[in-house]
Image (cartoon, grey):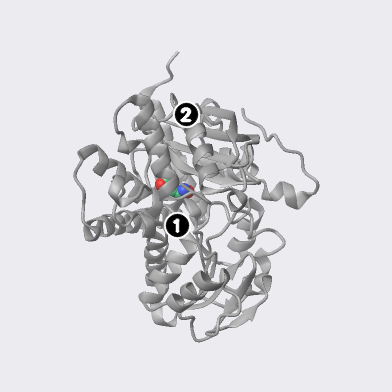
Amino acid sequence: MSVTTQSFENSLEREKNPWLAAAARFDIAAEKLKMDDGMRKVLRSPAREITVNIPVMLDDGRIEVFTGYRVQHSVARGPGKGGIRYAPDVSLDEVRALASWMTWKCAVVNIPFGGAKGGVICDPSILSDFELERITRRYTAELIEFIGPEKDVPAPDMNTNDRVMAWIMDTYSMHVRHTTTAVVTGKPMDLGGSRGRPEATGRGCMIVTGEALKKFGWRADSTRVVIQGFGNVGGMAAKLMAAAGFKIIAIVEYDGAIYNKNGLDIPALAKHKKETGSIRDFAGGENYDKTEAMYLECEVLIPAAMEGVITSQTADKLNCRIICEGANGPTTAIADEILADKKIFVIPDILANAGGVTVSYFEWVQDRQGFFWNEDLVNERLREIMVDSFNSVVAYGEKHNVHNRTAAYMLALDRVQFAMKLRGIYA
Ligand code: GLU
């Protein structure tokens, strides 16, 4: 069984370790499902972990070695699926956790994929475009026999985008000697990308939040929303939700927060950020302390930036009624209990942010058919899957008397275990 590779300085650091957080949720759900020991061992451990050390020539002629990972947690229900992140602090534990979350996420929304994730330790903010391209191509080349439309299909994640996906697609295609668009999703529209993919994760967050509102009998225009993160997920969620009438009262970023009790003008804020590089000092709101902003009174909090922000130290201070987890792993396992005591309705990450991988699935299907859908069809099918999945998780939780996160894990584990049993163990 995989164990953590890290040592910890203190208990908070341990609490925030994503692999331990993932394993804790797994254990709770497996226990409730009375899963047998053998199956637990199989599903708890990633099936394959690949580490590559890639030499890359920098623009000034120096050679640097970058470490990259690809973890395939499970391929029981279909090819591995999951993004690739570029960040200085990527670790194997993090990639493992993210890979397992992809397995459960794909199972929750019932799409025919397993779970995988990749990461390269690098700082894209100090690398040139050419350097990033060389890192991407060499990383892809090292993984060539492990990825493919039927094996493992990468996608964007933190600090990677459609341009990076185009390089992966091209490198893979050059190696196999024919253009293979379905090897990766989140590509540019002109290279087999799907309409609606860039907005998909944010749109999915809006859809499930809308379903939660129905349960509470609330209306969008009287719903105050605080969003942490203004990038691909948070930024899109803010844009779509503001257009749908939600009152986005605060946006929180790594360098500060901006607040307006009457609701921020999101398109104007996006323009301000584009021009100045920051949300701070936006004329349509007041600068706010980024830690305090998370504790503002609101109906919906959307952590859409990073892992481990809602912890045993912060959960008690939250003043929201619903948490919609746009990021992967924003809440620690210990904080789950505090949120449950506070009766906060949590839409867990493996459900809340599954809109992205759902439209990735549509992209893969369209690439393989060579036939592309219009945006309304993409959005309609996304809505159908998100609404069905939300209702299945909530109904499962009510039936088994567990909170939404445990319900989502139980549903997912059960689906994956069912596939494993049907396939049997090959020996
Ligand atoms: N990186 C996204 C996620 O964490 C998308 C993965 C995908 O589309 O494969 O869900």
Q: Nearer the viewer, residue 127 or 349?
A: 127
Task: Please name the residue shown 55% across and 85% down the image.
Answer: 283
Task: Please name the residue shown 30% across and 59% down the image.
Answer: 383
Residue 226 visible in the current orientation: no
Left or right, residue 90 beside residue 185: right
Left or right, residue 278 beside residue 400: right
Residue occupying the far front of the picture: 60
Residue 108 in picture, x, y percent from top left: 40, 47
Examine the rendered structure and indicate whether residue 384 appears above or below residue 14: below
Q: Nearer the viewer, residue 363 or 308?
A: 363
- Pick whichever of labels 1 and 2 is earlier in the sequence: 2
Secondary structure under badge 2?
helix
Distance from disc 1 to disc 2, alpha carbons, whole Å, reads: 33 Å
Residue occupying the far right of the picture: 9
Residue 256 in picture, x, y percent from top left: 64, 71
Within 10 Å of disc 2 (Cα), the crowding (few <14, some 14-19, many 20+) is some
Residue 66 in picture, x, y percent from top left: 62, 36
Dot label at residue 352 = 1
Instruction: Identify the image quadrant of the N terminus.
Output: top right
| Residue at the spot of label 2 | 141
Residue 148 in picture, x, y percent from top left: 37, 30
Within 10 Å of disc 1 (Cα), the crowding (few <14, some 14-19, many 20+) is many
Q: Quadrant of residue 176?
A: top left
Secondary structure under badge 1?
helix
Q: Amino acid at mark 2?
A: Ala
Instruction: Identify the image quadrant of the C terminus.
Output: top left
Q: Nearer the viewer, residue 175 or 213?
A: 175
